[in-house]
Image (tube, coloured by chain):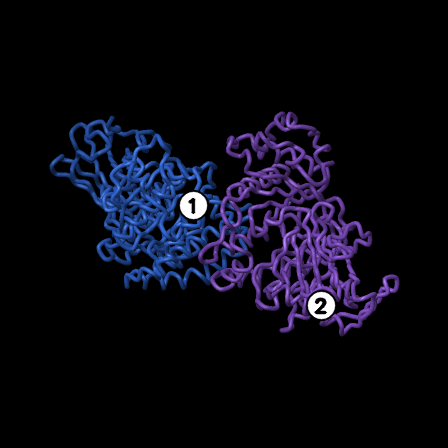
Chain colours: A blue, B purple
Amino acid sequence: MGGEAEKWVLMVTARTPTNIAVIKYWGKRDETLILPINDSISVTLDPNHLCTTTTVSVSPSFDQDRMWLNGKEISLQGGRFQSCLREIRARAQDVEDKKKGIKINKEDWQKLNLHIASYNNFPTAAGLASSAAGLACLVFSLAKLMNLKEDNSQLSAIARQGSGSACRSLYGGFVKWCMGKEENGSDSLAVQLADEKHWDDLVIIIAVVSARQKETSSTSGMRDTVVTSALIDHRAKEVVPKRIVEMEDAIQKKDFPSFARLACTDSNQFHAVCLDTYPPIFYMNDTSHRIISCVEKWNRAEGTPQVAYTFDAGPNAVMIARDRKTAASLLQRLLYNFPPQSDVDLDSYVIGDKSILQDAGIKDMKDVEGLTATPEVKDSILSEKSKGDVSYFICTRPGGGPVVLADESHALLDSVTGLPNA
Amino acid sequence: MGGEAEKWVLMVTARTPTNIAVIKYWGKRDETLILPINDSISVTLDPNHLCTTTTVSVSPSFDQDRMWLNGKEISLQGGRFQSCLREIRARAQDVEDKKKGIKINKEDWQKLNLHIASYNNFPTAAGLASSAAGLACLVFSLAKLMNLKEDNSQLSAIARQGSGSACRSLYGGFVKWCMGKEENGSDSLAVQLADEKHWDDLVIIIAVVSARQKETSSTSGMRDTVVTSALIDHRAKEVVPKRIVEMEDAIQKKDFPSFARLACTDSNQFHAVCLDTYPPIFYMNDTSHRIISCVEKWNRAEGTPQVAYTFDAGPNAVMIARDRKTAASLLQRLLYNFPPQSDVDLDSYVIGDKSILQDAGIKDMKDVEGLTATPEVKDSILSEKSKGDVSYFICTRPGGGPVVLADESHALLDSVTGLPNA
């Protein structure tokens, strides 16, 4: 160990995307190692709109491992954090920063303490896989700090032990989490199926749905499903393996109708096994159901899928439109059916890639009020009730994987004190 | 044929109960004969609170078959009515009414026309299996009119061709619809497992839930499920057969915990396969979900089930309480969590067996407003929103099967004209 009077702080800042599964992970065969009962496939979301930024730092002056999430200190004592920290420290290498005159030998990492600060550019509580992006970013940034030789796929097996779906956030584009066969979980890791440029027509709109009830955590939910559902085994062993093959093929061929059919039916089946759990788990609510009806009616009217939908362990809808033009039409339909409450302005109601809003020809709330019913819903009953059922929409697209932010201006920790920046 | 100047009218009036499945029927293997893909088991509901009354009449003066439902003439041209009429006429026997001087030879039934009037003592559109009671009553009353030799089980195979679940309304108490093996459907019929006196502790409370969306008909819904669900086959072949055996056993032993577990999990699984259908079918809504949560929390708090719930193809909850005392506690919980809108009076909000309301110590709306949260829900958030989510509650119990109403005062048709009474 070196540096002047042991007062140095070494830092790395990285940014990691969140991801949305289109073939769902639900159910573990090993609770501690977080080994799933089936493969899953996800789309990585553009980190410009949804990501976690994490700064990890090490200094001989730190007297314990500490972590801050969105500016608030949180405990690192949880088994999942500890698993990740242990696995990464075990693989740490020699690190030398000649400019700063710092040299850390790999065995020193066991003694050195870490400070970690993490920040989500979207609401943590909104049910948008913040833990996936967060754990992936923790593992990725620590791996860079400690100079690990492992590639992203090997790192994904470490992130997996922090939060299962985190392993899929180690890559951009389209990612498969292979369930693996080994008891130690070494082959339960993520591989990239295609990068984000492969199918760049796709546009994603997320409806953040107002939830009235506290939700079942996915950890306890999937445990209950594995123990009590009479259908989960059949899903994991018979249904998903075929869908994985078909989904890989649909992605390679950019076959949107197949992609949409598989994504929608697999989301629905995941929620079906939740309902088949005892006591039953409900993640979707009436607003989620109405969003599905809206998309399904349109898809049927067009004769071929325009939009796929998928829902994770909460009421939020993630909709994937086949192209920009379709996304603009989708946004019109969504704003017509789910207008904001009167005190909400458009700028905070549709966030992310606002160019979709421009494509839809919507500049202000008057344009929203001027929207008319589309042909496929003309016999539906729309009530005032729908106002406020959606909190806001996020427009985004498939995006890239983790990156190191070399520019120190992105750091969340002070380079001298190692404490969070104000 | 006889009678003075062919002006006679011969009538039979009967009353038939509705039923609620506790192991669900969902999916046909033959659409025309209405043959199911699995056995089902139901509880017959007390006809004093939920029943159909039907008067069937025959006269040489009738020039065509005609039917009135709740006072309004409806078409009898549908294939299902025609199936039932054809099957019954084929089994008609000689009928003689010496008092009226009427004699009908069995071959005459092919030429004679019928007038049928049917009346539900509950809202037809409320999703309370009105077609089951209706078709069962049609078949039962015609069988009496035409002096059929078939027993109720054989009649159930005819009613089945009108509406699948109608076959289970031919008996009181606990009824099993055996799916049968024959291609012609002759062994797909109902048998009584136990009569209504066998387990007379049970009390049933139905929450008629306000629906905002038009529902998928069960006929098209189950067809879509059979064609598109990846789980329905596993349910029908692997899951239900075991549950049927267990449910029969639970009913014979009056084992409420097993009865409740089976009824709840099978209702949930039926809705799970609906969700696994493509496009997905949603019958339960947020109010249904909240009712389930209310019951599940209470059951868990007590350590053993107090109440079972089951939902058919709609949002209404049918709750089965283990005894009167539990039913009174349940009604308190329901009225606390789902109070009526301010313009609704208690007398029309809780209908049926009002003695449960008395047992609950509730005489007026002030008593409803005075209800307090029960321990198991103390951490839940209850909002004003819940007012009006339930339209009304019906208190009832398991009840008896079809009966002929000999007293002519019950007739829905005029004994001279054969037209509906005003």
SS at mark 1 in the image:
helix
Q: Which chain carries label 1?
A: A
Looking at the image, is mark 1 or mark 2 nearer the viewer?
2
- Between A332 and A380, the residue placed more toward the observer is A380
The image position of residue A142, as x and y in percent, is 26, 41
The image position of residue B134, as x and y in percent, is 67, 56
Determine the residue located farthest toward the front in the rendered image: B5
Packing grade of label 1 (10 A; few <14, some 14-19, many >=20) is many
Q: Residue at x 69, y 54 (%)?
A: B118
Q: In which quarter of the image is the N terminus of chain A?
A: top left
Give the answer, above or below, for where B191 lies relative to B300.
Answer: below
Determine the residue located farthest toward the right in the rendered image: B99
Report which residue position mark 1 lands on.
Answer: A288
Packing grade of label 2 (10 A; few <14, some 14-19, many >=20) is many
Q: What residue type is labelled 1?
A: Ser
Q: Which amino acid does label 2 sit on?
A: Ile
Q: Which residue is drawn at 69% across and 38% down?
A: B326
Q: Which chain carries label 2?
A: B
Q: Calculate the distance from the C-alpha at mark 1 to the C-alpha at mark 2.
A: 47 Å
Which numbered disc covers residue B240? Answer: none
The image position of residue A79, as x and y in percent, is 41, 40
SS at mark 2 in the image:
helix
- In the visual, does B178 lie left or right of A67? right
- In the visual, does B191 lie left or right of A224? right
Report which residue position mark 2 lands on.
Answer: B88
Give the answer, above or below, for where B371 lies relative to B318.
Answer: above
